[in-house]
Image (tube, grey):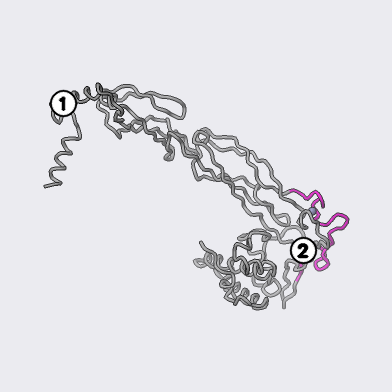
């Protein structure tokens, strides 16, 4: 889905003033707020609301707006620093709490009345072999994690300085607003709900107090997993904000193409080449299975395309009680690079078969009839 232009979303000109942006957003927010769009239209309204919210958050920040004007959507990343799109409508009260606070439900609040957000989910693509999918696997993956910054020990303040308690909210992260008969609690606009102001931010972490690192995670890939399935690792996504819960990590499984087997659910398929002599005379042939070699007896007169089923030699799916089957598809091979002697033998054989008429050629008779009626 292509992303709409932020100015178009808000319905304002490219040179719109901050005031115009705010007005346009306010109008859209009123129209699409979830509290006013219940039932059938709630999904669409929620999307529109999020779209407008994102556009406003980007354009109301002069730095982001400049980047957007120059590079378009590629210049700004709405997921950065927003602390969880789609989780409640937290940013709303922040921007307009003083006006709409009494109309709209508030975001979830943590200790001290601060706005808390759940961290974003992360996804990780993992490629495994068919054998690993069948047997299961203990894997190790490297994922980003956030640690307290070594320089400021997590405070976010430059060493030698310290974070100060926000004077607007006295460290509570929220403020009481009186509107007519109502008293409404809102996120503090000064410290944005953190309860603290950092006069001189730490250079190493930019005042975040935490830095991105790598950590190794043990993942159990269950036996029978199929291509496209996801494994959820709870709490290993991005960290939450203000003590909010971390997001989840989703490991998406991709199964590499196999040289021999093709998987279809719990069943496996493979092609088995057989000489035309063996196909004609019958005999024991060797076939591969995931557990090693197996032998099957093919009867005389086996035709190309015939399939033989080996029960239980497929894969036992995650939710299956029994393993699937292995289908061996017979591919009859035409001999190549014949010597003069071999040619002579085949010609003799051909003569002999022709004398026997159609009885040696099970599909030939029907075929000749079909051709006749097709051309007449
Ligand atoms: Zn730091
Ligand atoms: Zn404050």
Name the residue beneath numbered marker 1: 351
Q: What count of labels does the image hold?
A: 2
Magenta stretch, residue numbers: 147-176
User: Residue lying furthest right in this view?
Assistant: 160
Q: Secondary structure at mark 2?
A: loop
Name the residue beneath numbered marker 2: 173
Q: State the separation of the CA atoms marked 1 and 2.
A: 98 Å
Q: Secondary structure at mark 1?
A: helix
Residue nearer the viewer, 333 or 289:
333
In the rendered image, residue 148, in percent from the top left (x then y), is placed at 77, 49
Task: Write the residue at 67% across / 78% down.
Answer: 19
Task: Tell me the mark number nearer the camera, choosing from 1 and 2.
Answer: 1
In the rendered image, residue 27, in percent from the top left (x then y), is placed at 60, 76
Side (left or right) of 261 relative to 246: left
Side (left or right) of 212 relative to 3: right
Q: Is mark 2 within 8 Å of ligand 2?
A: yes
- Which quarter holds ligand 2? bottom right
The numbered mark at residue 141 is none
In the rendered image, residue 252, in percent from the top left (x then y), is placed at 55, 45
Task: Write the residue at 61% across / 50% down.
Answer: 122
In the rendered view, would you say 19 is above or below 275? below
> Would residue 150 be counted in the magenta stretch?
yes
Q: Residues within 10 Å of mark 2 (few under 14, many from 20)?
A: many
Q: Quadrant of residue 142?
A: top right
In the rendered image, residue 266, in percent from the top left (x then y), is placed at 44, 37
Q: Earlier in the sequence, mark 1 or mark 2?
A: 2
In the rendered view, would you say 224 is above or below 153? above
> Would residue 251 be counted in the magenta stretch?
no
In the rendered view, would you say 370 is above or below 301? below
């Amino acid at each position: 889905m292509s992303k709409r232009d932020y100015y178009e979303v808000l319905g304002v000109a490219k040179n719109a003033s901050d005031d115009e942006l705010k007005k346009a957003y306010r109008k859209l927010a009123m129209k699409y707020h979830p509290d006013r769009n219940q039932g059938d239209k709630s999904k669409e309204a929620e999307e529109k609301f999020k779209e407008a919210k994102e556009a406003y958050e980007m354009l109301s920040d002069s730095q982001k707006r400049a980047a957007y004007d120059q590079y378009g959507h590629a210049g700004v990343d709405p997921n950065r620093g927003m602390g969880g799109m789609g989780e409640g409508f937290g940013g709303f009260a922040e921007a307009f709490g003083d006006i709409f606070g009494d109309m709209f439900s508030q975001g979830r609040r943590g200790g001290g009345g601060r706005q808390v957000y759940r961290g974003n989910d992360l996804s990780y693509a993992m490629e495994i072999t068919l054998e690993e999918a069948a047997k299961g696997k203990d894997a190790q993956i490297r994922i980003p994690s956030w640690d307290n910054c070594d320089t400021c020990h997590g405070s976010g303040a430059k060493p030698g300085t310290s974070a100060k308690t926000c004077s607007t909210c006295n460290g509570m992260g929220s403020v009481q607003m009186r509107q007519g008969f109502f008293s409404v609690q809102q996120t503090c606009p000064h410290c944005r709900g953190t309860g603290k102001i950092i006069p001189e931010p730490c250079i190493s972490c930019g005042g975040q107090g935490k830095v991105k690192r790598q950590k190794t995670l043990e993942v159990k890939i269950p036996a029978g997993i199929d291509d496209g399935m996801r494994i959820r690792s709870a709490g290993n996504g991005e960290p939450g904000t203000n003590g909010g819960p971390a997001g989840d990590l989703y490991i998406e499984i991709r199964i590499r193409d196999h040289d021999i087997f093709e998987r279809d659910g719990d069943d496996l398929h493979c092609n088995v080449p057989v000489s035309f002599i063996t196909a004609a005379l019958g005999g024991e042939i060797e076939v591969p299975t995931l557990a090693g070699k197996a032998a099957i007896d093919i009867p005389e007169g086996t035709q190309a395309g015939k399939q033989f089923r080996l029960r239980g030699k497929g894969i036992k799916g995650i939710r299956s009680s029994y393993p699937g089957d292995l289908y061996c598809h017979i591919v009859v091979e035409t001999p190549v690079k014949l010597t003069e002697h071999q040619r002579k033998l085949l010609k003799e054989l051909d003569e002999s078969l022709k004398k026997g008429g159609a009885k040696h050629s099970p599909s030939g008779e029907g075929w000749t009839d079909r051709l006749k009626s097709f051309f007449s």
